[in-house]
Image: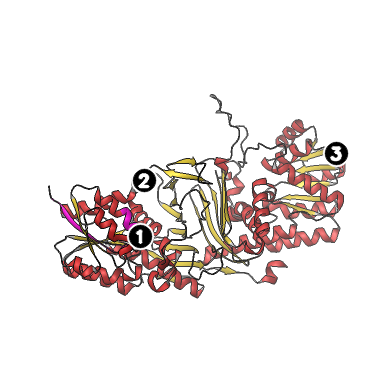
Amino acid sequence: MKRLKLGMISFAHSHAFDYLDALLKMKDVEVAGIADEDPTRTRELAESHSVVYYGDYRELLATNIDAIVICSENARHAEITVASAKAGKHVLCEKPLGLSAEEMEGMIAACREAGVQLMTAFPCRFLTPVIRAKEALERGEIGDIIAFKGTNRGSFPDPAWFSDPALAGGGAVLDHTVHVMDLMNWFSGSKVSEVYAYAETLFDPEGTRTIDDAGMVHVTFQNGIFGVLDPSWSRNPSFPTWGDVTLDVIGTKGVISIDAFNQKNSVYARGAGKGSWSFWGDDMNVLMIRAFVNALLEGREVPITGEDGMKSALVALEAYRSAEEGKPVRVFV
Amino acid sequence: MKVAVIGCGGMGTIHADRYASMPGITLTGVCDIDVQAAEKLAEKTGATHFSSMEDLIREARPDVVSIAVPTYMHVPLIKQAAEEKVHIICEKPIALSPAEAAEAIDFCESRGVRLFVGQVVRFFPQYQQLAEQIQHAGSSSAGIYHASRAGSHPGLVRDWYHDRQKSGGVIVDLMIHDIDYVLGAFGEIEEVFAFHRVQGGIDYASATFRCTNGTIAQLEGFWGYPGPFTTTFEFAGKDGIIRYDSNDAQSVRVRRTADLEQDGGFVETPQSELVHDPYYRELFHFLECIRSGMEPAVTAADALNALKWACAAEESAQSGLPVRLEKEAAKS
């Protein structure tokens, strides 16, 4: 059996823990190293799985691994991706791919020149309800798409760097626009031509937060489809789950409504002090990692490219420009 | 108090039915140019039927009339009733243009009659409860609000709904409920950005309103939705989240094996599981206001304001640009 030797760089983004879990269960994957600048969050974890820990990611890149999973702060995606490409490693990079068009173009170019693949971590594309919706669209069940309404509402993220514009590049509008934006891009088969957005800070009970935690992003596609999405970190600790991914697709002959995490049991535990929703649907992270690994092992193109990642991230970045200017802005001209 | 109903379609039937069961209220007449419809409703409610409003007012002598005719006829009938010194409860939307609506309001004032507009969402307990909770939150009530209102196209039953010159379309006729609600719950609006598409049997609109208090309200109005009539809302503020979905709030379901008979369907309205449904509450409240002289929970000026913002949404959908209204213009 062919095995993929894989390393992980940075656990700044907590999705790294989920990806590691998924990787460790795969028989055709060897997690050969974890590089993380903060040993307190990963050193013991690495050792408990007999994985080599590196304090400096360049040491990991010097080994004979095939591919890298990057879960650093957003601001470091470009630097680490380019370094990985130069070391000849394929890359799976956490979203948002980068913080500017130049940065992302540089990442894509570096991977192309090195002959390695770049995949953007958009696990929502691997949600089974999303795939069923895409299939229904392709069967023509709702005719042509007229409009989208989506939400990716979440809780304010725990790691402190999410509140630091220098490391995160933006707040909720950047973090939570990209997932559903990617689904809209995928479903529409078109490109966004115009963005009109609001970015606000509305959900801080302490009133000290400065990064945006609320927004509304409106897009118009080149083919005339309209989309609106709520990327707010508006869930509070008493909400029964972390957040949601929903997308209504309004077509000329019907409507598809996705509520991606609605496969759930309602749980009322005496000790918890609140009710909660326990999800039992397919694990999107496992499915995404599987797709990345399979593409590399079989020498096929990864299912979600760097270009896909850039298409969504740019909409989020342009959303901030629109919010600042108070008017719609043209994109991809 | 004597009341009469002008228009014996879907909404007129609801008005007549609620008046007929209201203590202290006499439903003296119902009227429709469609004689059969008037006869049918008269038979159901025990009222006398008429085929012209003039005859009805002269013979039945109502103190109040409900006007439940197609929207493009609202203003002429409001003026006709006001001229006869009869108080008016008019279905929403008050008119098709703000200028026309303002004219109707001024006319009623000048003739000394009261004018009420059936912005009924203000009388739905789930929405009332949300508004109270928002009000309770006070200055910290800015947040993100989503609301949708979706059902089959009423034009399938009444053709005039298809004609935007007559009905105003999905924003002016349907979304106006949620626009009025946003104005009532969050206060003034300062900007709208909207999308509106009419295609085949679908009339769909999506509009985001930005309120002066900081709230962003994203509203959807949908005629031609291929599912049950559905209303939803979610308000998220820093102190909490309140959400409602009509499909999750049914407390009694009756399902009959042979239930294929369409019972004179009209604009779908939610099933009520309340002793007094929101229409009854609304009409009762308006009649109370006439009796006591007090201000209603929703005024004709409120209805005009909602219409202004509905028309602003339409303008935004046409231009692709956000539309802001001057504060004075919005209030005048």
- What is the C-alpha distance between the residues marked 3 and 1? 62 Å
Disc 1 to disc 2, C-alpha distance: 17 Å
How packed mark 3 is, by other alpha carbons closer than 10 Å (few <14, some 14-19, many 20 or more), is few
Quadrant where the N terminus of chain B lies? top right
Residue A14 located within the stretch drawn in magenta: yes
Identity of the residue drawn at 18% across and 70% down: A86
> Which structural element holds mark 1?
loop
Residue B33 shows up from this direction:
no
Name the residue carrying label 3: B24
Query: Relative to residue B205, is residue A117 drawn left or right?
Result: left
> From the viewer's perspective, is residue A182 above or below residue B267?
below
Instruction: Return the residue nearer the eye: A186 or B57.
Output: A186
Looking at this view, is A74 or B115 the one in front?
A74
Instruction: Give the amino acid type for the residue marked by disc 2 in the picture.
Output: Gly
Amino acid on which the number 1 mark rests in the picture: Ser
Q: Which residues are magenta?
A: A1-18
Using the image as rendered, state which of residue B161 and residue A274 is in the foreground: A274
Query: Residue B165: which numbered mark, if any?
Result: none
Q: Give the chain letter at badge 2.
A: A
B98 within the magenta span: no
* Count of numbered badges drawn on the protein: 3
Residue A190's disc is: 1
The three-letter amino acid code for the residue at tag 3 is Gly
Q: Which residue is mark 2?
A: A140
